[in-house]
Image (cartoon, rainbow, N blue to C red):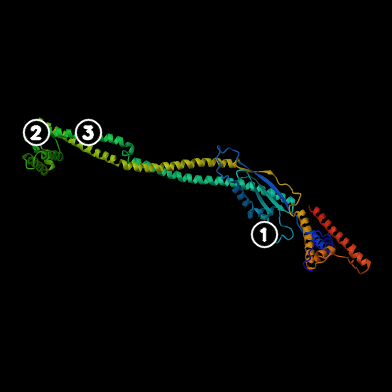
């Protein structure tokens, strides 16, 4: 009889199927209700308390006090969430509220208790328009509603305290870092400034800003040198002219210098100057040159006592006095000329080294300016950091404020009794209907003339009624009492389940 085709609107078939297999649906539904009653009795209610914390910006305007704490609220809340869920903090809460002290929890390891606590804690962000959290919710689930509320309040207090500690540690750490950097930069600045000062002192007079002055002085020295050289030349010409006009030999012997009380060294110095002057005008074999050389040799060979005892009573003649004056003038001008040449050499060296000094000074000045700029920048930041530290100590910065404190929950969050009841009913009815459908597929049956006509395409002429055997009591029990008892039992189980659900919230 496989492959029987039935009309979808054949109500006689469906009524017959229900009348035949109703007890299977009742049994599965009753078993499902019994299982549901057991689960409702054994399930533990979990309550959830939550508190809403507002992220409040700093009280002072940013243009008055510049904050140095990163304002990424999402990251900060995530960090604080990790802190309050740390093992140390959760162990303190477990010990403070004496959690996991009931039967079955005493043998739990602390790691397991901490893991359970972390699963029960939840931190949810509420994002604003700028994608930063403007508030967040801290919630905790547990079996005791009063204790759940207390733990939620403790978690909220911890997260607020941790926020204060985090902000203060950040500003203090930043301030310490800036102080260390400022100290190191100050040492570097002093070192660079000292090097620049020593460089200026070392090359004082040859610095780039003194180039115009050096050029002016060099021009004056050249003019003076030209004038002195002319004076030397003119003095020598006057001396030559004076000697030519006098046309008399120079007596340079020791006895021919009367009226002068000179020592041996002074006499030798005078004769050597006279010899140098003669050598510039004559050759080495000129009589005047030879005469002076002879006088020098004679004076050098005589003892100092003999030279000192010679009489010097005759005063200098006009010729000797004029010649001595001319020689003194020539020596003075030559000495000034040599000094001017030395000074000109120094100033020329300064002028020639000016480009080199300028490059070196530019490099030193650039390093000094960069370090000074960095130092002033660090100094300004360090001052702002100190102001930020004072602001955080006075709790004027960005803070967390509770706007919705935790309340004692009246209704359990888990389990959801409506879903439990719905699931039990759907499971019982679905299982029963599934079994009935499977039995119908395994044992197909004709129910009514319509099914036969559809299957055979032959009209039914007559129906043979069902022949029932047995006593009337048994048939009454099977057809009346048993279905009613099953229905009443199922209704009682359903009522018991609903009553337990109402009692447990």
Q: Residues within 10 Å of mark 1 (few under 14, many from 20)?
A: few
Residue shown at 58% from the left, 40% from the top: 391
Query: Is 99 left, or right, of 250 in this rendering?
Result: right
Residue 186: quadrant of the picture: top left
* Residue on which disc 3 sits: 224
Q: Mark 1–mark 2 contact, CB under 8 Å?
A: no
Which one is earlier in the sequence, the residue at label 1 or at label 3? Answer: 1
Which one is earlier in the sequence, the residue at label 2 or at label 3? Answer: 3
* Residue on which disc 1 sits: 112
Disc number lying in front (2 or 3):
3
* Residue on which disc 2 sits: 243
- In this orientation, which residue lies closer to the viewer: 291 or 495? 495
Residue shown at 84% from the left, 61% from the top: 12
Q: Residues within 10 Å of mark 3 (few under 14, many from 20)?
A: some
Residue shown at 74% from the left, 58% from the top: 102
Q: Mark 2–mark 3 contact, CB under 8 Å?
A: no
Q: CA distance from mark 2 to mark 3?
A: 28 Å
Instruction: Indicate whether 428 appears above or below 278.
Output: below
Instruction: Indicate whether 381 appears above or below 100.
Output: above
Q: CA distance from mark 1 to mark 3?
A: 102 Å
Q: Is residue 202 visible?
A: no
Residue 396 percent across, percent down from the top left: 60, 40
- In this orientation, which residue lies closer to the viewer: 4 or 398? 4
Residue 401: quadrant of the picture: top right
SS at mark 3?
Answer: helix
Residue 309 percent across, percent down from the top left: 11, 38
Disc number lying in front (1 or 3):
1
SS at mark 2?
Answer: helix
Query: Is 236 left, or right, of 1 in this rendering?
Result: left
């Amino acid at each position: 009889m496989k492959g029987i085709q039935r009309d979808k609107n054949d109500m006689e078939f469906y009524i017959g199927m229900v009348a035949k297999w109703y007890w299977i649906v009742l049994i599965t539904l009753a078993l499902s209700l019994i299982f549901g009653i057991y689960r409702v009795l054994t399930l533990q209610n979990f309550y959830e308390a939550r508190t809403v914390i507002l992220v409040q910006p700093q009280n002072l305007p940013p243009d008055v006090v510049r904050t140095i704490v990163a304002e990424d609220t999402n990251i900060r809340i995530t960090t604080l969430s990790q802190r309050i869920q740390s093992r140390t903090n959760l162990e303190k809460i477990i010990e403070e509220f004496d959690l996991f002290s009931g039967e079955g929890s005493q043998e739990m390891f602390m790691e397991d208790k901490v893991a359970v606590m972390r699963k029960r804690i939840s931190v949810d962000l509420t994002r604003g328009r700028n994608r930063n959290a403007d508030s967040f919710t801290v919630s905790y689930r547990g079996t005791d509603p009063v204790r759940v509320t207390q733990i939620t309040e403790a978690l909220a207090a911890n997260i607020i305290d941790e926020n204060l500690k985090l902000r203060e540690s950040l500003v203090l750490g930043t301030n310490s870092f800036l102080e260390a950097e400022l100290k190191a930069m100050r040492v570097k600045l002093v070192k660079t400034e000292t090097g620049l000062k020593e460089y200026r002192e070392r090359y004082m007079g040859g610095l780039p800003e003194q180039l115009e002055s050096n050029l002016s002085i060099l021009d004056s020295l050249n003019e003076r040198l030209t004038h002195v050289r002319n004076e030397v030349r003119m003095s020598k010409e006057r001396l030559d002219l004076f000697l030519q006009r006098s046309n008399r030999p120079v007596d340079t012997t020791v006895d021919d210098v009367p009226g002068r009380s000179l020592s041996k060294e002074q006499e030798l110095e005078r004769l050597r100057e006279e010899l140098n002057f003669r050598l510039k005008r004559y050759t080495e074999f000129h009589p005047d040159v030879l005469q002076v050389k002879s006088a020098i040799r004679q004076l050098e060979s005589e003892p100092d006592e003999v030279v000192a005892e010679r009489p010097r009573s005759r005063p200098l003649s006009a010729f000797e006095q004029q010649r001595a004056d001319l020689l003194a003038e020539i020596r003075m001008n030559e000495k000034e000329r040599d000094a001017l040449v030395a000074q000109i050499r120094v100033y020329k060296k300064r002028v020639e080294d000016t480009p080199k000094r300028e490059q070196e000074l530019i490099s030193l000045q650039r390093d000094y300016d960069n370090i000074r700029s960095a130092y002033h920048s660090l100094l300004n930041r360090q001052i702002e950091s100190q102001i930020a530290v004072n602001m955080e100590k006075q709790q004027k910065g960005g803070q967390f404020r509770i706007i919705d404190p935790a309340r004692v929950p009246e209704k359990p969050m888990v389990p959801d009794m409506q879903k439990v009841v719905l699931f039990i009913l759907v499971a019982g009815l679905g299982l029963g209907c599934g079994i009935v459908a499977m039995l119908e597929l395994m044992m197909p049956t004709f129910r009514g003339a319509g099914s036969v006509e559809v299957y055979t395409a032959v009209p039914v002429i007559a129906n043979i009624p069902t022949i029932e055997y047995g006593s009337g009591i048994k048939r009454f029990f099977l057809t009346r009492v048993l279905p009613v008892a099953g229905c009443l039992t199922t209704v009682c189980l359903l009522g018991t389940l609903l009553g337990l659900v109402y009692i447990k919230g």
